[in-house]
Each structure stands twice: as structure tokens, then as C-alpha cells.
Amino acid sequence: MEMRHQLQDQLKRLKMPGLWQALDLRLSEAQTNNLGHLEFLSLLIQDELANREDHMLGKRLRAAGFGVQKSFEGFDFRFNEEALPASMLRDLATCHFISQKQNLVIGGPPGIGKTHAVKSIGHEAARHGYQVLFRSTQKLLAELQSDSAERAERVLRRAIAVDLLILDDFAFRKLDQREAEMLYVLAEERLGKASTVLTSNRPPEDWYAIFPDPVVGGAILDRLVSAAIKIITTKGKSYRREVMAKENRTMEENSR
Ligand code: ADP
Ligand code: MG
């Protein structure tokens, strides 16, 4: 018992909670299966590593600010296969485009799964160890103009630095000069250094009109969109309308 306490204390000081949690299980496993010393140690180290990775992933997911989390596990690839090709989404899920610092643009009508898809890509990126920031474009622009200059500065630094910046619902409304300037800073600072993902309900050719100054607008879109991987569609069924409406009807029927 003395030794257990000592060990627990030492593991706490070493910050190795995963090893401590797994100890009893691994001890009995070692006894039942007659594990060698090295094998036993190796299993415990793996437990500690797995625990750390879990912990770090949790941190990255929280820092990303997904709100409602979505992942490809809950994504029906066949539902809108024509609008959002499964093969492209699967390629994107490998995060190769992030290592290549490429941008991604997904444009198409509401409800077809754009936000779900880019949150899922963000989730995969976090699993790959990338730092991710997810925001609706409106919200990020508001945060960048926070009353607290310190907060605004912190958000800007993070939005520039993350490996993957996801701007959901881009080109939702017209921007003012200040907002356009901030977007320009983001686009310029990230170009070729880190991936930016945009989703929009409008086609990219309509995006120029949201900027107060066509020159700045052109410069921003040139940086964000020109060399981006693009999935632009006018097709696609609204999952919200078709599947969720059906589910709601079934729920109502069942509750009667
Ligand atoms: P968009 O961003 O294109 O407007 P969303 O991604 O918000 O659409 O999708 C609307 C709702 O439908 C969300 O709750 C989303 O999780 C769900 N959804 C959309 N497409 C799929 C799909 N292929 N499989 C599972 N759920 C989906
Ligand atoms: Mg959306």
C-alpha cells in the first residue's frame, strides 16, 4: 500500500494520470497473461500517451468553437452526393489540403450540409493535431471589433495563426470599410501559410458586391478564392427540409 501511495504521488508530480488510471487493469492483465516486464511497461506508456492525446484533442475541439459539433461519423455521404461529392469530402478529410496550405470554398443552397461538412473537416483536422478556429463570418468580424481592444487583438492573432480557419456563411451581407480591411488582413496574412475554408449560400461571383470598394474586394477574393479547391453547386436537397422534417413528423406521430 505504501508503494502504491508513493507511486500515485510520483505519477501526479510527473503529470501522468493516464498511467495511474490504467495501472490496476494492466497489473491484472500482466498477471493473467504472464506479460514480460517490457511489455507491461510499454502498455502503460501507451495508456499515458493515449490519455494525453485524448486530452489535447478535447482542448483543440473546445478551442475551435464549433458550437454544435458535427463529424463525418454522423454524415450521410449519399444524401447529397451530386452536390457534395463523397470522394472530394473524403479527400478533404485526410487533411492533405491543410498540409498544402490550400484554401477551400463550398458554395450552395441552404440546408445541403455545407456547415456540417466543414465542421467535420475541422474535426478531422483537430484529430490530426491541427489548431482550428470555426466561426460564422459575422461573428468573427464582430469579435474583431470587440470593445475590448485586447480581446480583438487576441482574436485577430489567433485567426491569423491557426492551421485551419473556417469562415462559415461568408458573403451573408454587405460589409463596411472596416470589416473589409480586417478580412484583407486575414486573407493576406494567411495566404500560402495556412488554409482558410469558406462556405456560402451565394455563388462566388456574387461575392464582389458585398465589398464597399471593388479594389479591396478583388484583392480579398483573389487571395481567398482564386487558388482554392472549390465545390460550388446550385443543386442539392435541403437535409433540414427532407430528413429533419420527416423525423419531426414521426416524433409527433409517436407522441400522439
Ligand atoms: P448548410 O450549412 O448547407 O445550410 P447544414 O450543414 O447546416 O446546411 O445542414 C442542415 C442540417 O442538416 C444540419 O443539422 C446538418 O447536421 C444536417 N445535415 C445536412 N446534410 C447532412 C448529411 N448529408 N448527413 C447528415 N446530416 C446532414
Ligand atoms: Mg450553414
Image (spheres, rainbow, N blue to C red):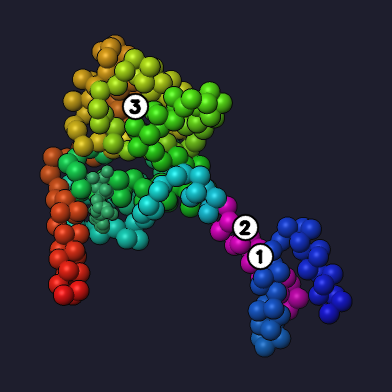
Residue 87 lies, in percent from the top left, at: 27, 51
What is the x, y in percent for residue 28?
69, 84
Percent position of residue 206, x then y:
18, 25
In the image, 217 versus 228, the foreground residue is 217
Q: Which residue type carries mark 1?
A: Gly
Which amino acid type is marked by label 3? Leu
Q: Position of residue 164 (x, y in %)?
A: 44, 38
Residue positioned 12% across, 44% down in the render: 235
Mark 2 secondary-structure assignment: helix
**For the point 16% across and 75% down, which residue is it?**
256
CB under 8 Å between discs 2 and 1: yes
**Quick one: label 1 or label 3, which is nearer the N terminus?**
1
Residue nearer the viewer, 64 or 235: 64
Q: Magenta stretch? A: 36-56
Quarter of the N terminus within the rendering: bottom right
Left or right placement of residue 218 versus residue 202 in this view: right
Please identify the residue farthest to the right as the structure is shown: 2
Q: Which residue is mark 2?
A: 52
Q: Where is 3 relative to 106, above or below?
A: below
CA distance for labels 2 and 1? 7 Å
